Image (cartoon, rainbow, N blue to C red):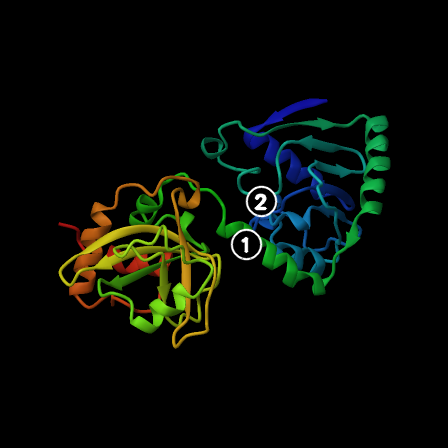
Amino acid sequence: MAFLQGDRLTQVIRMVVKSSRCDLAVAYWGSTAITELDLPTDLNGYQIACDADSGLVSPDVVRTLLKREAAVYAVPKLHSKVYRADTQMVVTSANASTNGLAGDAEVDMGLEAGVLITDQGEIKSAEVWLTSIFGKGRPLAESDLPWIRKLWNRRRSQRLTRLPLAEAILAQSPDIKDRNIKVHIYGAAEPPPEVMATYKGTDFYDADKWDEEVYPFYWGRWPSVKVRDQLLTFEWSGRKASCDGVWELVACIKSGPEPVWPAVKIDRPMGLALGGTRVLDRRVTDAVKGGKLTPDGVPLSLERFASIIAEVDAP
């Protein structure tokens, strides 16, 4: 038995999975798993168990595994990370992902560890256990990819970030990719009477809490927006923009001339406080004045918004 960590752990796992036959019970498979494991192009004879219900298994990776003729099983609540070949195996904390299998010691920081086992008695015991795991699983096929992708996209949109949202936008961080947060710039004018009437006719309206200065809803025909999406909003006064925070759209009311979107304010988008917005306010102001952003337009993705304001120099 040998203790493994860091880059050495990654190297040994890659060595094990290049066997002519390998059984893997690894819960989570990131989008780079094929590359990180350096898997063979022919996986006939490989059996792979994963927790496809978790939202942490890449549908593109599953498609590749199936195309390479691996037998892939969905095992709900699986949490193990076992890489077993006929003569050796690794039991570890590392999933099949960039975070789990960092090839760069500075990136990995020694946070994953495992053991290499060559004792044939232990390997036989693992074979018995793996057989039971595969028996509990459901074989995956191409037809399962749409629901795996749906779970994957939902989980990615809700993942936490290391930077507050405002900083992540300014840095054009990868953390803003594939989020359910969009950016909306709205004018300071009051809602049209018919829109106000639509909102007040819903169960979301509470006369005791109504504030004529703050409207807890938005309105507009937004094909790319859906209920439970979040809006990072900026109010445009005609001279400057000011951030109004992040709001989650809790419903879409279509009974009036324009859809009305009741909303609740979110204090910690992406798991952290929004952060200071002074620079964002200045850049949005300049972008609107320069014709790069349009108030009351269709909400933008975070990536598109970040790209636009990156072209604007904040004073």
- Is tag 1's residue or tag 2's residue first in the polypeptide sequence? 2
Q: Position of residue 99 (x, y in %)?
A: 53, 39
Residue beneath the point at 65% across and 60% down: 147
Q: Position of residue 200 (x, y in %)?
A: 39, 64
Check the image and report above or below for 62 versus 292.
above
Q: Nearer the viewer, mark 1 or mark 2?
A: 1
Mark 2 is surrounded, within 10 Å at the Cα level, by few (under 14), some (14 to 19) or many (20 or more) other residues, namely: many
Q: Secondary structure at mark 1?
A: helix
Counting labels gives 2
Q: Position of residue 128 (x, y in %)?
A: 86, 36
Residue beneath the point at 34% across and 73% down: 194
Q: Position of residue 300 (x, y in %)?
A: 35, 63
Check disc 1 and give the amino acid type: Arg
Check the image and report above or below for 22 versus 207.
above
The quadrant in which residue 116 appears is top right
Q: Secondary structure at mark 2?
A: helix
Q: Nearer the viewer, residue 216 or 174?
A: 216
Residue farthest along the bottom direction in this orientation: 257
Residue 60 visible in the shown view: no
Q: Which mark is residue 65?
A: none
Mark 1 is surrounded, within 10 Å at the Cα level, by few (under 14), some (14 to 19) or many (20 or more) other residues, namely: some
Residue 240 is left or right of residue 293, and the answer is: left
Q: Which residue is mark 1?
A: 154
Residue farthest along the front direction in this orientation: 208
Check the image and report above or below for 239 versus 35.
below
Check disc 2 and give the amino acid type: Glu
Q: Which residue is mark 2?
A: 36
Residues at marks 1 and 2, CA–CA distance in whole angstroms: 24 Å
Is the residue under label 2 in contact with that under label 1 (CB below 8 Å)? no
Q: Nearer the viewer, residue 59 or 36?
A: 59
Residue 84 is left or right of residue 230, and the answer is: right
